[in-house]
Amino acid sequence: MKTKILIPLLVLIILVIGGVLVYENVFFKEESKNGNQDCIHSDNYNIKLIMPTSFGLLAQLALLPNGDIAIGDSSNDQILLFHNNTFETIVSGDINPWAVAALPDGRIAYIKRNEVSLFDYKTKQEEHLGKVPGDRYLQALGSDRHGNIYVGTSGAGLFRFKDGKLDKLADSLPFSDLDSVQITDIAVGSDGIVYVAGFEKVFAVDSTGAIQLIAEGLVDEPVYLEVGPDGMVYVNELSHGLQRFDPKTKQLSQLNIRYQFLDMLALTANEFFVYDSRGVLYTLNLQNNTIKPLYTNVGNGFAFAAGVNDTVFFATPSLEPVLRQHIVELNSAGERIDLYNLEYVAIFAADVDNENRLTLLTNEGIVRLNHDGLIKTVPIRIEGREFPMMRNFAAGQGAWYVTVTDFNEKIEIFSVDEMGKVKFLPISFTRESLGAYKVDDARIDVAPDGSLALIVTAKGSASQGPYIQRVYRADADGSNLREIARLDSNRVAGMVDIAIGPDNSVFVLNMQGESNFGSDSIYKIDKNNEVTEVVDICLGRDPESIDVDSSGNIWFGSTLGVFQAKPAR
């Protein structure tokens, strides 16, 4: 029987790890420097920001005439200017980072205190253009080649500032739910057609006010738009990926792009500037699917493990095939060491075993850093079947446990011994067992007594939620599987993780919010399966990983950086 050996895999991870190449240029408000207490807080833990990121969760992009790029940073309430691969904060304080536009004269339009404002980067002058009458909340901005500014508002309204005067183009675009719809992006073609994206739908509005539906059935999350130099309209969102609308044929087609990203700018008809949730900024060639990394952020990723002596390990991001990953060691004083000897095409997960040795799940197999500095690699071999997509792992007593998923039918768990031999546990989760549209992901950890804990996720529908999040415990051999918590959310996706504390309590990171207005939380599940929130993290700070060290301290990464939460004494 043929033995399949683990080979380098494509890193097909949606909304995944933050990373590191450059982190010296940090632009944070004062509350971020002291731990961002306004948006990350706990009643029972003292939270400290150990290492900040260069930026938080990026939102809207705008291309200036000179080639610079203005970017809204939703985590830090600021607008950044990306110039020569460096960042500078140009506007901060009470701004809407999802509403940024560039004018032909080089000024930047944005929403501040629910009013459209303009900023001239050369003179550093700010001008307040005006508000929309009534109690509408301003949600998105776009601009055309004549310098007109288009404003999307609550109630699905569309307005235009032309020569300083405000016109109403549409009182209510025909979205499904006018009370809750968010307009998330506006793009304007060279012919003056205005494209408006919101939760679920995209519309085109011409100069007469006629409205045309060009996309529907989209995700109940931000939808991004861009008009290329050739007039093609690009629609990007979580459930479908990148689609292209041809205004001449009125056809919407799916593009086979292997990379997942958020907002985009068309630099040419085929080259896009994009960013992803890992914090990687890069250019993407649509014609041949090639990429060029420009900048990577630091500190938030799925490969994340707390060690001894107040240290944590995490992996830099991957942008396969041009950006490899390596491990960073960080202590509680903020001192960082880059472990370039631990560099791989892909680092899927990290853990510290019961002998305090760092172990990694990589494209080459399981890697362990021994105390003498030697690196042991155990290739994983699976006989008689295609190699499944590995997502997470944990170090047990004499074995490693790996979660795999096909993101459709089934999630499975297997163990690996020191020789690389694989044994599938009697644990699997299917669409039927979870009552889901598709299975999604799973995270695993091993308790001090050798038992297992898992958080398993699934999608309830193609684009409108719910996001199923279930927590389980099992014995070391996979027997006695039992559900200990249901933490389902109305979202359509989320970041989850699991860790077990020194007293065998389970800690889970999950999204527990209504639609797009929820927050992320870390919960503690005790021996009686009582669920208690221990850390609350506001919307837009997007944590992806947690771990608990031997002293009971919680470590977690977010778009703001790496944090440590110590139990209050």
Image (cartoon, rainbow, N blue to C red):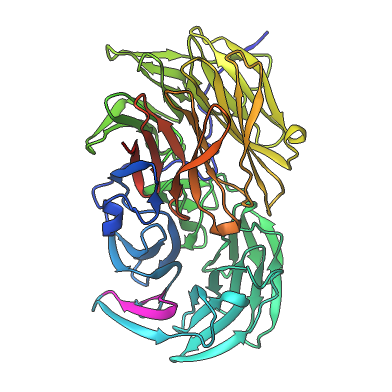
How many discs appear?
A: 0
- Give above or below for 138 relative to 567: below
- Give above or below for 462 relative to 66: above
110 in magenta? yes
| Residue 432 horizontal side relative to residue 563, left or right | right
- Give above or below for 67 relative to 336: below
On the image, the x and y values in percent for residue 139 come to 51, 72
Residue drawn at (67%, 49%), measured in percent from left and top? 466
Which image quadrant: the N terminus? Answer: top right
- Along the viewing direction, whichever of 486 and 446 lies nearer the viewer: 486
On the image, the x and y values in percent for residue 552 come to 37, 29
Residue drawn at (54%, 26%), measured in percent from left and top? 527
| Residue 409 horizontal side relative to residue 151, left or right | right
On the image, the x and y values in percent for residue 420 come to 52, 11
- Along the viewing direction, whichever of 126 and 351 lies nearer the viewer: 351
Residue drawn at (29%, 28%), measured in percent from left and top? 339
Q: Which residues are magenta?
A: 108-121
Residue drawn at (71%, 64%), measured in percent from left and top? 251
Residue 327 appears anywhere in the view: no
